[in-house]
Structure formats: C-alpha cells, structure tokens
Amino acid sequence: MIKVAVILPVYKNDQISYLDLSVESILRQSYNNLHLYIGVDGPIGEDLHDRLKALEHQKNISLIWFEKNRGLACVLNDLLDICFKDGYEYIARMDADDISSTDRIEKQMAYLETHSEIDVVGGAINEIDGNGNNRGKTIVYPVAPEDCRKFFSKRNPHAHPAVLFRKSFFDKLDGKKYRPEYRQNQDTMLWYDGMMAGTKHANIPDVVLNFRMTNAMFKKRRNGWAFAKKQFEDRLMINRDLGYGIGADLYGFAMFCMLISPAGIKKIAYRVFR
C-alpha cells in the first residue's frame, strides 16, 4: 500500500472525548499504511495536554507542538510541509471532533488510483450531534469534476475534513497552500485558488465521515457583520473569476443575509439550503 499521511489540528477548545473518537477512527482504518500527524495550535489545558502526550508514544502518530495559537490555516500549512518533507504524495484531512468511516481512506485511495487526473477527492458526510446521535441529514457532494466546479457557484465542493489530497494539488499552486490570513473560510479560498490553478476535484458518493454539528456552531461560528461582509466580498470575487454569473451573486447575497441572522434562523436556513 502507498503510504498516506493524515493531518489533524487540535486547539484548546477541543474536547478529549471527541478527539479520542476521531483518532480512533483513523487508527482503525482498513487502509493500514497510515501515519497521523497531530498539530497542536498553541497553549491547551492540562487534561488535553496529558491526553495528547499519551498519544505521542503510539507508533503511527506524530505530535507537533506549536508554541503560539496562529489559527487553523497556519497549522495545516506547517503539517503539509512536514508531510511533503517526509515524502508523502497523499495527505488526508481530519478534524478533532469528527469520525471517519472505517473504509474511508481505502475507498478514496482506490478512487485516486483509478482516476489519475483528480487532485483531491472528498465524499458524502453524515451529520451527528454533540452526543454522537444522527441528526437525520446526509450531505452528498457532486462526483465529477465539472459538477464540483458548478456546485462551487453556491457552496463548497467538499466537506473540508473529509478530503484526501494528492501532492499534485499543491504543486499546481506553485507551493502555495492555505491562506494564513484567513481564520475562517480557509477551505473556500483553497478551493478557489485550486480551481484558478486548474486542479481537478471529485467526490465519492459513499459516506466517509460523521460530521459533528452542535448548537455552538450556529451561535459562535460564522457570526457577525464583519465576517458576513468579508465572505460576501470573497464570494463575489470567486463568482467573477470563475465566471459563475448573476445567479451566483444573488445566492451569495442570500447567504450574507443568513449569516447576519439570529442563531435560530441560521439553523432553519441550514437545514433548507445545505
């Protein structure tokens, strides 16, 4: 089997119980030539520190401790650099509160091995709540590259923690990776930069990840006028540069209105439009 790296960022607010399930889902993959790189973004609590130190002794796990909290994009970029230095041609994303299906990497690698033109592959996700219960929502992303490009006129073409990259994705960006100035929406800008550089995107139709959705995501994440305004401005740029047209602009404005709405309205809109 070709060796595959999995990069997983951790920061101070991550819950130990969620992290344990996330790490376990990677270590139990049916594709067994994996190495997990965990990047710790700045200072963390004692309990989380002790749990990570215990993981550090496992054979297929490397811990990278970063002194300062710099944000997700910076941690991912440093982890990617480490993987490239270590010779990895395939790098999977993972988050500290999600759970990969046991055969996720096996299926995604099988897809890439039979589709040499594809630079990044994702998959469908199943939403779970804070207790791990199904929320009754499965999101299936478009499969073919041309459909991924069309889909990006409204929403991201992948679930970020569910993707597997070839190194070729970043080679086409001439060494660029995630934009470090983005504390949020790093993935949107990466897909934009990639498509502008000619990267090919795809998804498999199978569920590859249990994606954790909690009330905190609606109350704390993606809130505020400044964030909504910046996202709308970015969306207009994406629509212009990728030639999506006025319909995509109108959809972007609808998303702007949703982002500045109360959390309750966000939850309703999310179920309707995502």
Image (cartoon, helix red, strand yellow):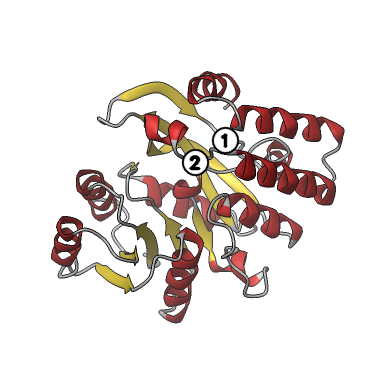
Mark 2 residue element: strand
37 w.r.t. 134: above or below: below
Q: Amino acid at mark 2?
A: Gly
Q: Residues within 10 Å of mark 1 (few under 14, many from 20)?
A: many
Residue wearing tag 1: 141
Quadrant in which residue 146 is drawn: top right
- The quadrant the C terminus occupies is top right
| Between 244 and 269, the one nearer to me in the picture | 269
* Residue at screen point 19% across, 62% down: 49
Q: Position of residue 23 (x, y in %)?
A: 26, 53
45 w.r.t. 160: above or below: below
| Between 45 and 92, the one nearer to me in the picture | 45
Q: Which mark is residue 123?
A: 2
- Count of numbered labels shown in the rendering: 2
* Residue at screen point 45% across, 55% down: 109
Q: Position of residue 88 (x, y in %)?
A: 44, 72
CB within 8 Å, label 2 to label 1: yes
Q: Amino acid at mark 1?
A: Tyr
Q: Is residue 206 left or right of residue 39?
A: right
On the question of residue 202 being in view, the answer is: yes
* Residue at screen point 45% across, 63% down: 91
